[in-house]
Image (spheres, helix red, strand yellow):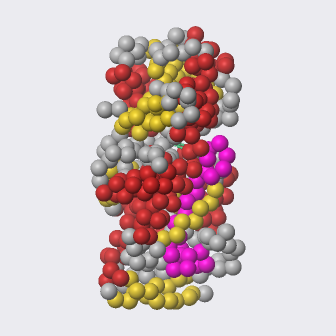
Amino acid sequence: MKSVWFRYLLSFGFPILLTACTQGNNAPSSGGNAPSSGGNSGGAISIGIAVAQTSNVALLGQEQVAGAKLAEKYFNEKGGINGTPIKLVLQDTAGDEQGAINAFQTLINRDKVVGIVGPTLSQQAFSADPIADRAKVPVLGPSNTAKGIPEIGDYIARVSAPVAVVAPNAVKAALKINPQIKKVAVFYAQNDAFSKSETEIFQQTVKEQKLELATVQKFQTTDTDFQSQATAGMNAKPDLVIVSGLAADGGNLVRQLRELGYKGLIIGGNGLNTSNLFPVCKKLCDGILIAQAYNPSQPNAMNKGFRDAYLAQYKKEPPQFSAQAFTGVQVFVEALTTMSKANPTMKVNAQPIADLRVGLNKQLLAGKYSTPLGEISFTPTGEIVQKDFYVAQVKMDADGTNGKFTFLK
Ligand code: 1QQ
């Protein structure tokens, strides 16, 4: 069944017909979020956000929700897609593969979103992305940095630069702070695809920098007790420690290393890249170096808009995961806007959702975007092309309750 209605798209000053394809119209509603028809919700274009709102991975995912919601508000205040608002449909992936698969299926089949920003972990992306790819639904990975993500399929791209280009910056920064570093102890979570990918890059960088890889210790993201790994690490007498894990496990490992008396520099990977780490290692988080794909002082207008909105709401500088989620929504919005401008009589949120998704995927890969991350574009495979990367260092207050990321020059 098809329903038809009229909207006026202001940018062209004349009416444009928007039709909605109402496949699966008897689908249940998701807390008022589910659109009644293909790709639109009461006339708005639906964009899926599939990130971890619960589980230990919510330490990372809640920053993504914040960024995506700011984007929804920001772009709707600017007129949405040539006058048609966007509506985010959030589905919680929790922290595992099955949660991500369920969220993707719901967004694709019930909520009929045009595209998905998600999931939080590469570990989840390797399971959930093939589902979207087979359904020809464009996915933008907001924080999927493992090797091989864009290669999952034609409909998979990412706005999160890969570990291969981000992580080595932290090792170089550590060597700048302490040129005497010789021995390195590396720790990684062996049950997590991102951590395995990141540690490979870190270990390769250690060798390239002619440092000694003194020991490699493995753990699980669900671990809380790291005594045996931390002790083995200490026995290797490292003057640099590198941790690839997620926030809770990574924070506990850092804390236990410091409690055992480790005094040298510590590099944390992308999984530790959140202030939600601070309650885990408290003042012992102080000094952790983390490479960044976002810098709040990025000077362009889009970052100013994003940063001002974030500061107003959260009273602190925006974190990388929020900036990347904002960017994911932005890319969808701008690609859809280009499509609608290129063809003013086009039925933006009206053509069959399948056609809209296919067209959107093609358009988003072709575009250039001025985002909070700086200027970005994509390779034909869907890999992000981004210029600038940074390194920040955690600075904790003396009592260990508050901290911040200080960007290194
Ligand atoms: C990945 C990551 C995570 C640490 C981001 C939350 O980079 O899984 O690829």
Q: Residue at x 57, y 14 (%)?
A: 261
* Residue 328 relative to residue 279: left or right: left
Closest to the observer: 204 or 402? 402
Please say if 167 is above or below 371: above
Closest to the observer: 282 or 228? 282
- Is residue 222 found inside the magenta-colored segment of the image? no
Q: Residue at x 65, y 42 (%)?
A: 56
The image shows a total of numbered marks equal to 0
Please say if 291 is above or below 133: above
Quarter of the image with the N terminus is: bottom right
Point out residue 138 in the picture as x, y percentages from the top left corner. 49, 62
Q: Quadrant of residue 293?
A: top left
Point out residue 349 in the picture as x, y percentages from the top left corner. 48, 78
Q: Quadrant of residue 173?
A: top left
Specify the farthest residue to the front: 399
Closest to the observer: 356 or 52? 52
* Residue 145 relative to residue 364: left or right: right
Q: What is the magenta range?
A: 35-58
Q: Residue at x 59, y 81 (%)?
A: 22
- Is residue 38 found inside the magenta-colored segment of the image? yes
Quarter of the image with the C terminus is: top left
Whether residue 152 appears in this view of the structure is no
Please say if 329 is above or below 119: below
Point out residue 215 in the picture as x, y percentages from the top left corner. 54, 17
Q: Residue at x 33, y 76 (%)?
A: 341
Closest to the observer: 81 or 307? 307
Whether residue 90 appears in this view of the structure is yes
* Residue 124 relative to residue 360: left or right: right
